[in-house]
Amino acid sequence: MRILLQFPEGLKQHALTYAQEYERKGDEVIISAEPSYGACDIPIYEAKLLKCDKIVHFGHTKYMDIREIPVEYVIIKADVDVKGVMKEVLKKIAGKGYKKVGIITNASHLHQVSDIKEILREGGVEPFTAKGSIRCDNEAQILGCDVSALNKIRGKVECILYFGAGYFHALAPGAVEDYTLPPVLWADPYSKEVKWIDEELRRIQKKRKIALAKAYEAKTFGILVSTKIGQYGLESAHEIKRAIEKEGRKAVLICGGTFDFTSLNNFTDVQCFINTACPRLIDDQSKLRIPIINASDFWTMIRAN
């Protein structure tokens, strides 16, 4: 069997090891060098071009149904101590006097959620978790683009604990959610750092608000449509275009796989971009001379008019 292996950037250092394991089973292996932005970004075109029989995607849970080719999802479970960092978590929570805490995490730590909940209970704190949308339907799981698990518990808790490494998931609540978040505590079990990240979340939300204010004044919009299978939103883009034109403003659809901000800056006739692709695209908006807002914030703007 010929298989295509796909890794996120943090796992590419182990790609050869995993490739050799499949080769020992008798498979012919090809490793994708393309950046992988999640399970929304499965390399179907490359696999079919290379005549592969299967794609093996590392690091994420299933995001969508794919019929064109079999896809196997491999989760790399974090082998890291929970108890050590949770001692500091309990101290931080006690310092605020909180007794009800929501838990969110990424795919690598799903197997540790029950341990985290037990430690919180032993420390006199009531833990809350929920399953999110169909895209991340494991208990307490969030994606960089989907924090629906948080939304289901936010009204029941005094703060949120994000357990995991890296800013990408830790800052997801501020990047893709509305502007009324409970306090968020980030516990990184690798660095052992535990800190409140409300200031960082507010900075992200402030950037979104500034871009939204500029969008109110814009007369010409470029609507970004991703050609990645899990980010594809042409129907949404058409709906946005109709709403813009109904207000007497202009809009054009702009498609791409990976949007390069240097290239986007060359669209000098565009006064604002509206993003229907991955909502985390706007994380790097400081690299753009032209303001960019997500589709959800666009509809906020329209309802306010």
Image (tube, rainbow, N blue to C red):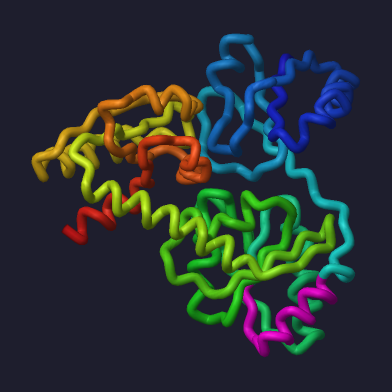
Q: Position of residue 24 (x, y in %)?
A: 90, 20
**Residue 179: in magenta span:** no
Q: Residue at x 67, y 78 (%)?
A: 127
**Residue 89: in magenta span:** yes
Vertical side of 237 occupied by 140: above or below = below
Vertical side of 6 occupied by 64: above or below = below
The answer to whether residue 33 is left or right of residue 225 is right
Nearest the eye: 188 or 66: 188
Q: Position of residue 204 (x, y in %)?
A: 50, 56
Q: Quadrant of residue 255?
A: top left
Q: Position of residue 140 (x, y in %)?
A: 63, 63
Vertical side of 197 occupied by 191: above or below = above
Q: Residue at x 58, y 51 (%)?
A: 143
Q: Residue at x 84, y 76 (%)?
A: 87
Nearest the eye: 36 or 262: 262
Location of the N terminus (image quadrant): top right
The answer to whether residue 33 is left or right of residue 259 is right
